[in-house]
Image (tube, rainbow, N blue to C red):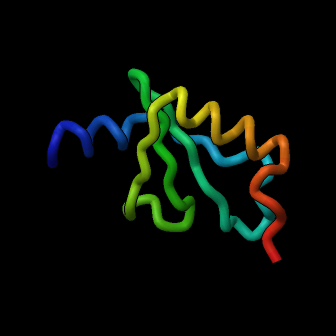
């Protein structure tokens, strides 16, 4: 197991606040200048990693409704 994998496993993941009761959610973890995002139903799967400023820009724009609603 690489250092990056070990580091990601110890992030203290938390589910999104608007997580649905069915458990299909995203989880977010933060460490040394990065935000990691994963699927809560597949915690061993892929992890997306973003810089703090990129994540802040994304969440700010999402709150402003810039991405529209899914159908």
Q: Residue at x 41, y 54 (%)?
A: 47
**Measured from the top left, where is residue 15 in percent x and y?**
65, 47
Q: Nearer the viewer, residue 55 or 27?
A: 55
Q: Is residue 38 above or below residue 4?
A: below
Q: Residue at x 39, y 64 (%)?
A: 45
Mark count: 0
In the rendered image, the residue lying farthest to the bottom is 71
Q: Nearer the viewer, residue 10 or 49?
A: 49
In the rendered image, the residue lying farthest to the front is 66
Is 10 displayed left or right of 65 in the figure? left
Q: Is residue 70 above or below residue 35?
A: below
Q: Is residue 32 above or below residue 22?
A: above
Q: Residue at x 64, y 41 (%)?
A: 58
Q: Quadrant of residue 14?
A: top right
In the rendered image, the residue lying farthest to the top is 32
Which image quarter is the C terminus in?
bottom right
Q: Nearer the viewer, residue 1 or 54?
A: 54
Is 66 displayed left or right of 30 in the figure? right
**Measured from the top left, where is residue 67 in percent x and y?**
75, 56
**Measured from the top left, where is residue 66 in percent x and y?**
79, 50
Q: Residue at x 83, y 65 (%)?
A: 69
Is 13 displayed left or right of 64 in the figure? left
């Amino acid at each position: 197991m690489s250092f990056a994998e070990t580091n990601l496993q110890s992030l203290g993941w938390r589910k999104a606040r608007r997580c649905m009761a069915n458990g299909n959610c995203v989880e977010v973890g933060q460490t040394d200048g990065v935000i990691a995002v994963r699927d809560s139903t597949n915690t061993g799967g892929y992890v997306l990693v973003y810089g703090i400023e990129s994540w802040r820009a994304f969440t700010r724009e999402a709150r402003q409704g810039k991405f529209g609603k899914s159908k």
